[in-house]
Amino acid sequence: MDDDVERAARKVRDVGQVVSEHVARSGPITGRASSPDGAVTVVATPGGPPQEITVSAAALRMGPQGLAAEIMRVADRARRAAGSRLHQTLERVVDPRELTALGFERGHDDEQHQGWLR
């Protein structure tokens, strides 16, 4: 039993080290999304809060509730784009099924063209 626990702990450490090195090489992983008219743009991290929100003067015509809803919608797309980028970056070193189980799904090509940054 102790050997099994030690082997599992060693594997977790080894995978953690490989993931850390891989992410360090790839740089920060963020996602960027914009509203269809470009009035709202959000940059976010995988599963994290928005890092940057840009609102054009035209977006102010949406009113407070409309603008808030649009920011939330675009922020969700930015988070999903970041999660997809994280999935693509780590699937070389971690089982992709485990990444999906953690909530980082690989996006479809039509979602990915909306942009993500490293």
Image (cartoon, rainbow, N blue to C red):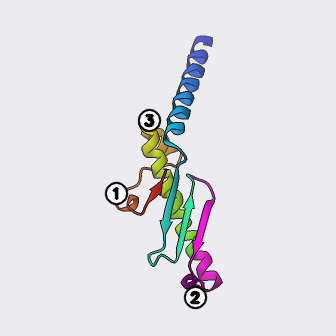
Q: Earlier in the sequence, mark 1 or mark 3?
A: 3
The N terminus - image quarter: top right
Q: Which residue is mark 1?
A: 109
Residue at 53%, 44% in the rendered image: 27
The magenta span reads 47-69
Q: Which mark is residue 95?
A: 3
Queried whether the magenta region covers residue 78, the answer comes back as no
Element under disc 2: helix
Residue at 58%, 53% in the rendered image: 47
In the visual, does 53 lie left or right of 101? right
Crowdedness of circle 1 by 10 Å Cα count: few (<14), some, many (20+)?
few
**Distance of label 1 from label 3 (alpha carbons):** 20 Å
Crowdedness of circle 2 by 10 Å Cα count: few (<14), some, many (20+)?
few
Q: Position of residue 32 (x, y in %)?
A: 50, 61
In the visual, does 109 lie left or right of 14? left
Establish if 45 lies above or below 15. Answer: below
Q: Position of residue 34 (x, y in %)?
A: 48, 70
Q: Are marks 1 and 3 in contact (CB under 8 Å)?
A: no
Q: Position of residue 63 (x, y in %)?
A: 62, 86
Element under disc 3: loop
Q: Mark 1 or mark 3, which is nearer to you?
A: 1
Residue at 58%, 71% in the rendered image: 54
Queried whether the magenta region covers residue 60, the answer comes back as yes
